[in-house]
Image (tube, helix red, strand yellow):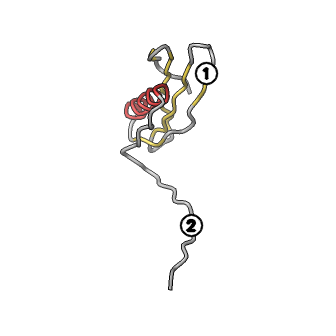
Amino acid sequence: MEAEYEVLYKGCTLSPIAIDDGDFYSAMVVIGMPSGDRRASGTLGQFPCALSARQFALAYGMADVDHREPPIPDWPVQITLRSTQHRLRA
């Protein structure tokens, strides 16, 4: 699992990563800060191809550097819903 390229964005290095998971690709990004610190995003979602996974990872990394809301994947393969209990009013 290595980034194929790095993008310099506002002094930070963004390394988008696409991980082949068989039927889909998982995306993540490693952000290198100007101070030398690095942090990884964790899995960002599942995508139909490596290119779309890396594009999403870059968009996510740019939003993180800008302190903006992260993008939402437009192609979810799996959606996990938390089990919640709702009270019904009589």
Q: Amino acid at mark 1?
A: Arg
Query: Percent x, y for residue 49?
Result: 39, 36
Query: Percent x, y for residue 19?
Result: 51, 34
Mark 1–mark 2 Cα distance, whole angstroms, equals: 36 Å
Q: Amino acid at mark 2?
A: Thr
How many C-alpha atoms fall within 10 Å of the one at disc 1: few (<14), some, or many (≥20)? Answer: few
What is the tally of numbered marks visible in this picture? 2
Marks 1,2: beta carbons within 8 A: no
Report the residue at 45% width, 37% height from top: 70
Query: Percent x, y for residue 74?
Result: 36, 44
Tell me where residue 37 sits by quadrant: top right
Looking at the rendered image, the quarter that the N terminus falls into is top right
Which of the pair 32/75 is nearer the observer?
32
Which of the pair 52/87 is nearer the observer?
87
Residue where numbered disc 1 is placed: 38
Tell me where residue 42 sits by quadrant: top right
Which of the pair 90/55 is nearer the observer?
90
Q: Please, what secondary structure does the residue beneath circle 2 have? A: loop
Which of the pair 80/8 is nearer the observer?
8
View extreme (right): residue: 37
Is 7 located above or below residue 65 in the figure? above
The answer to whether residue 72 is left or right of residue 38 is left
The answer to whether residue 76 is left or right of residue 28 is left
How many C-alpha atoms fall within 10 Å of the one at disc 2: few (<14), some, or many (≥20)? Answer: few
Residue where numbered disc 2 is placed: 84
Report the residue at 61% width, 21% height from top: 38
Q: Please, what secondary structure does the residue beneath circle 1 have? A: strand
Q: Earlier in the sequence, mark 1 or mark 2?
A: 1
Query: Percent x, y for residue 53?
Result: 42, 34
